[in-house]
Image: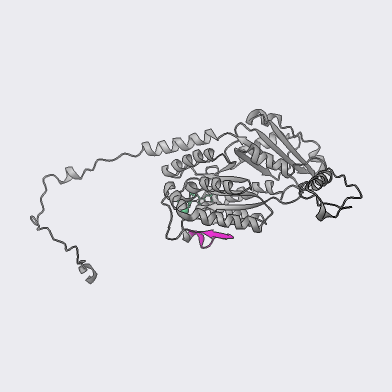
Amino acid sequence: MPNKEMWSEEMIAEQIKRTSVEQKPADVPEVSATDTIPDSNKRRNFLVVGCGDGGSMIAQAIRDSIPGTYTICYNTSARAMEKLKADIKIVPQAEDGSGKVRDYSKDVFKQGSYKHLLGNVKAALEHHTDIAYILVTTTTDGGTGSGVSPMVARFIADNSEIPVIVIGVYPALTEDATAQFNALNWQAEVEKIKLPYMIFDNGAVSGPKSMVHRMVNKEIADVLKVITGDYYGNSDISMIDSRDMYMLLQHTGKRIFIETDTDRPKTGQSLDDYVKNMIEDAYQPKPVNVKGIGVFVKGPASMIGSLDTSLTEVRGIYGDAAIQYVHVQESDDVQISVIMAGCSEPTDRLYTIRSRYDDIMNAQHDDESALGDLMSGMNNPLGTMKKRTVDAAEPDLSALDI
Ligand SMILES: Nc1nc2c(ncn2[C@@H]2O[C@H](COP(=O)(O)OP(=O)(O)OP(=O)(O)O)[C@@H](O)[C@H]2O)c(=O)[nH]1
Ligand SMILES: [Mg+2]
């Protein structure tokens, strides 16, 4: 009987195959099965890379709400980062904001920040081997986060093996034309980098800015718990495990819409109706052309027994998904969630951004200066003054005596 050290690769492969189907002959030493059978009850932790002010605040909100999250925040403004809670903060020296210019932010990043960022991402992945997804969070209408986030996400995805998801927030329609312009440019770049992404929307909430930010950030952290496994555990009824989640998020990819709620469906209310309401109320543009759906239902036996998880009506409206995973779990508390992946761009919302931009720009008139008319026929009452000569070599310090 060979001991483990003497096994050939073929023997190990054979043994892994056996353990994965749980056939363990008594005379062969046991090989840990954790590599072959993913533990579905394991948390799927995040490394979050926050870009810019808003993106870093979102990273912080996720960190506050989901234990096990590791955050790296990148910003061009050090002031905003002072109070921020993050595991790593990266601020390029001598920078102070981007002035809402996306290209400026990209240039700064390309000049060297990318090396610091990647070094820190790699170190984090080495120390935290339980990280399942990397999230790149950003607002889409400033300069810093909007400018760098697509290239940051692509760059990390190209240099690590962990799946990357981009999370962006569209601006409220009350933001200026530059904001609307930046958001459309961000959207175009995010489609170009071909990574899965989620969109949240400051325009979906009305109220004072700080409140809107807080609510949207909280919502982002909340729906992400559907991915980590915070909300759903093992179930002997029907299970979405880590591989299913990966297929939905990464393989189906494109735009991903996730929504979750804790209300119990009203008596007689169908799951279709419940999910339609959830989509209406989301702080995200509605899903379009859905290709993959994950349905999660957790609740008492009386509730889960009466809900039809096929979502025929929802699929009729938002896209008849080619693949559907279902999780049903008996539990005292209620949690109902959907993941809709493979969505097309949220075209309707993008049109509102464009028309807001047009409205502002069309309202801008370059008023002709009336000064020429006002001053015609006037002469200086003091007569013509001699032009003062300035000595370029010697500064005029006279003003300092005042
Ligand atoms: N949801 C949300 N939106 C925010 C937050 N902070 C700022 N915003 C919004 O994000 C937009 C862009 O602002 P910032 O995130 O500060 O932009 P930035 O990436 O730092 O880029 P610059 O400041 O232009 O260099 C504005 O419309 C803000 O109202 C936040 O914490 N959450
Ligand atoms: Mg900023």
- Given the current orientation, which residue lies at the most extreme left position? 383
Residue 81 is a magenta residue: yes
Vertical arrangement, residue 33 with respect to residue 275, above or below: below
Tell me residue 151's x, y (percent): 51, 46
Q: Write the residue at 23% across / 43% down.
A: 369
Q: State the extent of the magenta-drawn residues as a range.
A: 80-91
Residue 177 is a magenta residue: no
Instruction: Count all numbered tags in the image, as a single digit.
Output: 0
Tell me residue 310's x, y (percent): 74, 32
Q: Write the residue at 43% across / 55% down.
A: 97
Foreground residue, 148 or 306?
A: 148
Q: Can residue 139 be spotted in the picture? A: no
- Given the current orientation, which residue lies at the most extreme right position? 26
Tell me residue 159's x, y (percent): 58, 49
Apparent side of residue 369 relative to residue 282 in the rendered image (left or right): left
Tell me residue 279's x, y (percent): 63, 37
Apparent side of residue 247 relative to residue 94 in the rendered image (left or right): right
Foreground residue, 58 or 13?
A: 13
Look at the image and name its color scheme.
one colour
Question: In the rendered view of the protein, which quadrant contains the C terminus?
Answer: bottom left
Foreground residue, 43 or 373?
A: 43
Residue 247 placement: quadrant: top right
- Given the current orientation, which residue lies at the most extreme bottom position? 401
Apparent side of residue 310 relative to residue 276 in the rendered image (left or right): right
- Given the current orientation, which residue lies at the most extreme top position? 316
Vertical arrangement, residue 362 with respect to residue 116, above or below: above
Foreground residue, 115 or 227?
A: 115
Q: Can residue 120 be spotted in the picture? A: yes
